[in-house]
Amino acid sequence: MNCVDRLAAAAVAIVLALLVAGCGGGSSTETKLIGGGIGGGSGATVVSLDAPTGPNTTEIVVDSGPESGFSLGAANIPYVTVTVCTAGSSTDCVTIDHVFLDTGSVGLRVLKSVVAKLSLPPILAPATLPGTATAGHAVECYPFVLGAVWGGLASADVRIAAELASSLPVQLIDDSDPPSDPVPADCIASANGGLLTSSASLQANGILGVGMIAYDCGLTCTTGSYTSGYALYYSCPEGGSGACVPTGLAAAMQMQNPVAHFALNNNGTVIAMPALPDLGAGIAKGRLVFGIGTQSNNQLPLTAKIYSVDANPASATYLYLNTTVGTTVYADSYIDSGSNALFFDDASVAQGCQSSAGSTGGWYCPPSMLTRTATVTGATGTSGRVDYSVANADALFSTSSVAFANLAGSVTQGSSTFVWGLPFFYGRTVFTSIWGQALSPNGPWNAF
């Protein structure tokens, strides 16, 4: 599986959106949230982790999503706030809340309408690039497990907390109707469920991809050789006057990991999330920290283990870990904040959900809480024990909570896949390195 395929397999939260309703749940030890609405109704809980702090940190919020997105809300989606500015300006800016934090993809993607007032300059695909007969503006089709985003690339400054990535390629997700550029048939085919063109379908105002690599494709997209998979980048004539054609795109023009372009704290991220009650929380707050070992607040603890992922792009397990549960081996495992549950195939876990949300989502609904132990093994042989729980999805969805540490399901990615989604992050501090940045030892790896 090449880099494009691996990263596009992430962000499973976009696949299994939840509409959850009801009242109840909570813990007497938690702060009560006053007010109506899902994730904020009577009895909903707020669980917060307020450290570490510092200029290289920002808040992560798991709540019911952007106000413009859902009337009922979505579950286990981590959001951050990002500011996008015209390159070189500190005042011509738009601050965007509810940007989906995803360690399984790379690059900042925001709805085009949200930044329309900035008139960001498009990135051009010169006719000299492979596959491009005539010059046009660069457009990306980026697929997830179900659904894809389509939109042009533009240059902008990206600010998060006190960090700045200057003149960065960002994707402007086309949310106009009809799209400004005609969507190619092969992009629609790769979408596996349709294009994500609004805050409702995206469950966010954008996606912040802070994965393990510095840019989202690499050699395949540089050469425009898409014979082994779907096309990622296209050249589209100005004004939507003709068909978009697949094209190569120089590495510096491809979607970039914003963190890799920060001045100092550029070698990875740290996500710290609070532990949750069994029935979840209406709002969960944690911290996103930039850099690993660059500041006093992002040091790797002596108790943490480093789990290297397969760094061979030609390998079938590229960027994967190994997870073993009992006698079952999941060779294609990865840790991903952009997946809203633990995802794995296990025929021994009941899927007899009765609620409308649970019955249609592939969720597990065991009659009582399951507690299991897995062994996670890195590419260099480091292994460690990870305990996890699987609750009845019907019981979870009947509460007013939207953040769950024990939500699990199957998305039929294959019997070899185990996705350690957002539930894995609750109660942990998880480090994600960026390959090629200054690290000791070198990445890519996760540590916890």
Image (cartoon, rainbow, N blue to C red):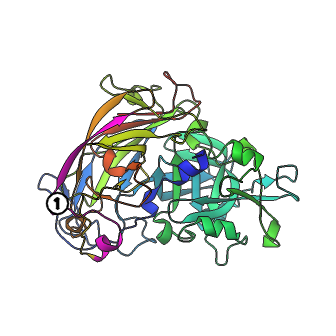
Q: Is residue 191 placed above or below 294 in the rendered structure?
A: below
Q: Residue at x 21, y 70 (%)?
A: 398
Check residue 262 for magenta coloring: no
* Closer-to-camera residue (446/312): 312
The reply to whether residue 53 is visible in this rendering is: no
Residue type of the residue flagged with mark 1 = Gly
Q: Position of residue 385 (x, y in %)?
A: 27, 35
Q: In the image, is 313 to the left or to the right of 275?
A: right
Q: Quadrant of residue 219?
A: top right
Mark 1 crowdedness (10 Å alpha carbons): few <14, some 14-19, many ≥20: many
Q: Position of residue 182 (x, y in %)?
A: 72, 72
For label 1, the residue is 26
Q: Residue at x 30, y 55 (%)?
A: 346
The reply to whether residue 68 is visible in this rendering is: yes
Q: Residue furthest front?
A: 327
Q: In the image, is 231 to the left or to the right of 372?
A: right
Q: Which residues are magenta?
A: 356-377
Q: Position of residue 440 (x, y in %)?
A: 49, 21
* Closer-to-camera residue (430/116): 430
Q: Residue at x 67, y 42 (%)?
A: 218
SS at badge 1: loop
Check residue 368 for magenta coloring: yes
Q: Is residue 383 placed above or below 154 in the rendered structure?
A: above
Q: Quadrant of residue 263?
A: top right
